[in-house]
Image: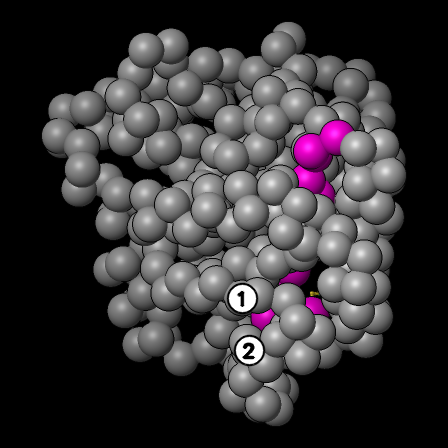
Amino acid sequence: MSTALAPARTDERLTGVPGEPLDHRRYRRMRFIRRFEETLLQLFEEGALNGTTHACIGQEADAVAVTEHLTEGDHIFSNHRCHGHYLAHSGDALGLMAEIMGKEAGVCRGLGGSQHICAPGFKSNGVQGGIVPNAAGIALANQLSGNDAVSVVFIGDGTLGEGVVYETLNMASLWKLPLLVVCEDNRWAQSTPIAANMAGSFPGRFSAFGVPVRSVDSTDVAEISQAAGQEIAAVRAGEGPRVLLIHTYRLCHHSKSDDERPEQEIAERWLVEPLVVHGRRLSDSDRLRIDDEVETALGEVVATARALP
Ligand SMILES: Cc1ncc(C[n+]2csc(CCOP(=O)(O)OP(=O)(O)O)c2C)c(N)n1
């Protein structure tokens, strides 16, 4: 996990109990993100929250795997679907819940909401692709400072339609910036399937700029972590920008209710979602114990956040 945690707002029942096996910790962290977002959707349904939100249900393994390889000084840049990235980075469940509730104690004093988080080592922005140049800018600053910090920017497949991504890739490649682009291909951009908006190939979009692409077609946190670790190590070693392309799936609607995807397609993906795939590595009793601990801790977070001014 990133070391840029805000200790007062994290809870080891959500982020990892000292000494527990890595498999348990990974399961706990994915379960935490899953239940946090399911709780959010429920709060929206109850009318307890305003605005909109985009959950990453089904994509939790990406956030957990990538952040395992980041450390103090590194920066994460995210997008409209940022909760999993932020929670994996910071563990700050209370700060994010309070933020989305519009409370003063929120990570951005309740002004940023679900999509616009500004915290130590973490920035997100709801404008598709808009934050990619910022990630390169911080990467350039780190390069000029002579440290080995990296910038990691998460984008979706649909964001490959944004020109600013290519302008950034061009300069990042020329300047050998310490930048990792993590492209989460969840097969759909809102209601548009990838086949309807992508000419050419995924890797071609990056190799045109001489940027190496590593593809992982998996929802297995261990497999994604192995790939992420190697890519981040190469970026940190000064080899220039790289892309980690993760083929995954979004199990929930695009935002709160919009979903035009075939039901059969979604049903099939529930069988291979990250908690199911990784959960098989744990005994039933360990899984249930962790589920209970996460549930209790999250219940406390929601109650505390609700009571905040
Ligand atoms: C510049 C811009 N255009 C349109 C939107 C509206 N919008 C928000 S998310 C989204 C789809 C994004 O798809 P993708 O990049 O694949 O990410 P995903 O939602 O699948 O995680 C759109 C069109 C936006 N936020 N910014």
Judging depth in this view, the residue of 229 and 301 nearest the camera is: 229
Image position of 186 with respect to 108: above or below: below
The residue under the point 51% across, 35% down is: 69
**Residue at x-position 61% and y-position 41%:** 237
Residue 232, position in %: x, y?
55, 44
Where residue 86 sits, quadrant-wise, is: top right
Q: Is residue 194 visible?
A: yes
Can residue 63 be seen?
no
Provide residue 35's location: percent of width, then percent of height: 44, 36
Distance from mark 1 CB to nearest ligand 1 atom below 8 Å: no
Seen in the picture, residue 26 relative to 65 is either above or below; the reply is: above
Disc 2 is placed on an element classified as: helix
- Indicate left or right for 28 with 72 as reference: left
- Crowd band around label 1 with a 10 angstrom C-alpha radius: few (<14), some (14–19), many (20+): many
Identify which residue is drawn at 58% across, 60% down: 243
Q: Position of residue 98 (x, y in %)?
A: 70, 26
> Dot 2: within a 10 Å radius of its alpha carbon, few (fewer than 14), some, or many (20 or more) residues?
some
Q: Mark 2 is on which residue type?
A: Phe
CB of mark 2 within 8 Å of CB of mark 1?
A: yes
Q: Quadrant of the C terminus?
A: top right
Question: Which dot marks residue 213?
Answer: 1
Task: Say which label, 2 or 1, has the lower sequence index.
Answer: 2
Q: Which residues are magenta?
A: 147-159
Q: Secondary structure at mark 1?
A: strand
**Residue 146 coordinates in the image, percent (x, y):** 80, 33
* Residue 266 relative to residue 98: left or right: left
Q: Which residue is mark 2?
A: 202
